[in-house]
Amino acid sequence: MKKILALVLALVMCIGCASAFADKVGVSMPTKDLQRWVQDGENMEKELKDAGFEVELQYASNDVPTQLNQVETMIDNGCNVIVISAIEGSSLGTALAKAKEKGVKVIAYDRLLMDSDAVDYYATFDNYMVGTVQGTYVKEQLDLDNAAGPFYMEITAGDPGDNNARYFYQGAIDVLKPYMDAGKIVVRSGQIEFDQVATPTWKTDVAQKRADDILTGYYANGEQLDVWLCSNDSTALGVTNALDNYTGEGWPIITGQDCDIANTKNMIAGKQAMSVFKDTRTLAAQVVKMIKQILAGEEVEVNDTETYNNNVITVPSYLCAPVFADANNYKELLVDSGYYTEDQLK
Ligand code: BGC
């Protein structure tokens, strides 16, 4: 009996010890305002806990000092690895330097951390490809190689503080530029350059306000508008809201990215033409794999060592593949795969 008791005691102590020494991972997400980050955070937390890690998950309310503070606290709390999706890629320098000094590994999550040598890895979706998928969709829908045009397009891009935003924009523009140069696509507002079409913090109401102004300024008499190229779903939502006041014929093609619930509903209702699905479960799984490899001292799997230079170093990256989504394939992509329930999309 005594022996059994001693054994049980030893076992309990052992489990206690193991959890006290479990590796700890910090996860710093930009905001809870946009659906995708809530999903990213939850997926990361679940995957990491399932893998036996302790997790410290924080959202920073899109406030840079808050995120800086949260990351520093994660370092102080003994996190071994910190996964960061930055609000502003270049604003976390001091925290990153502190992580490096303490031997804490840093993985940039979805958005690259800029201007620092203290970034060990980057895991994301192929950002340029997201733009290419959007641009190619527009090209094919308008049959730009054969149709005479001109077609009329406006552009809404993302946050200048987010390194991804320029990749999305450039990927789409590289496909469409030849047709713009040839006059087949006309941007009535003349607002084409990234800085003219950007949306600070990706906010829906900011995108809506700019779209309202463009519609009032250039389309008030029902002028033809065929496409509104939007870099993601939060901005597409703002543009779609603004377009409720559009008096021209038909409804323009609106592009997006993320397959947020509101936007997927708009796709089903015919108000948004397409989105780009970035399965956050895939990204979370890849990051957990990276963390395990880092902590086991193994070689970390990456598939791109050239593209993502952060102004100081080129960060070894793993790029997941984004997938085209529209009203025809959303069921298979989003419902059958268990990403959303049918009810969530009603
Ligand atoms: C992400 C997009 C997202 C956007 C706004 C980007 O960094 O890659 O998926 O739509 O931020 O949150």
Image (cartoon, rainbow, N blue to C red):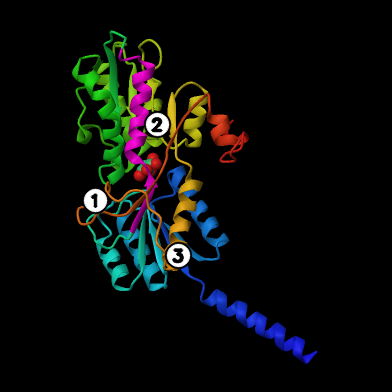
- Judging by the rendered image, the residue that carries numbered circle 3 is 25
Q: Is residue 133 magenta?
A: yes
Q: Is residue 113 magenta?
A: no
**Closer to the camera, 191 or 172?**
172
Confirm or reject: label 2 Cβ below 8 Å from ligand 1. Answer: no
Mark 3 crowd level (few <14, some 14–19, many ≥20, 10 Å Cα): many
Find residue 176 and report its horizontal and vertical position in percent.
Answer: 27, 24
Q: Quadrant of the C terminus?
A: top right
Most prominent secondary structure in the magenta stretch?
helix
**Closer to the camera, 167 or 214?**
167
Mark 2 crowd level (few <14, some 14–19, many ≥20, 10 Å Cα): many
Find residue 94 and report its horizontal and vertical position in percent.
Answer: 25, 65
Q: Secondary structure at mark 2?
A: loop
Q: Quadrant of residue 155?
A: top left
Q: Quadrant of ligand 1?
A: top left
**Closer to the camera, 112 or 202?**
112
Residue at horizontal 29 percent and vertical 64 percent from the top: 96
Hey, which residue is sitting farthest right in the picture?
Answer: 1
Residue at horizontal 61 percent and vertical 37 percent from the top: 341
**Which disc number belongs to residue 309?**
1
Hey, which residue is sitting farthest front in the picture?
Answer: 299
Q: Callout 3, which amino acid? A: Val
Kindly report the distance in space between the C-alpha atoms of the residues bearing marks 2 and 3: 32 Å
Q: Do residues under tags 1 and 2 come within 8 Å of each other at their CB atoms?
A: no
Find residue 87 and report its horizontal and vertical position in percent.
Answer: 33, 51
Q: Is residue 205 visible?
A: no
- Extent of the magenta region: 121-145
- Judging by the rendered image, the residue that carries numbered circle 2 is 256
Q: Which of pointers 1 and 2 lies earlier in the amino acid sequence?
A: 2
Q: Secondary structure at mark 3?
A: strand
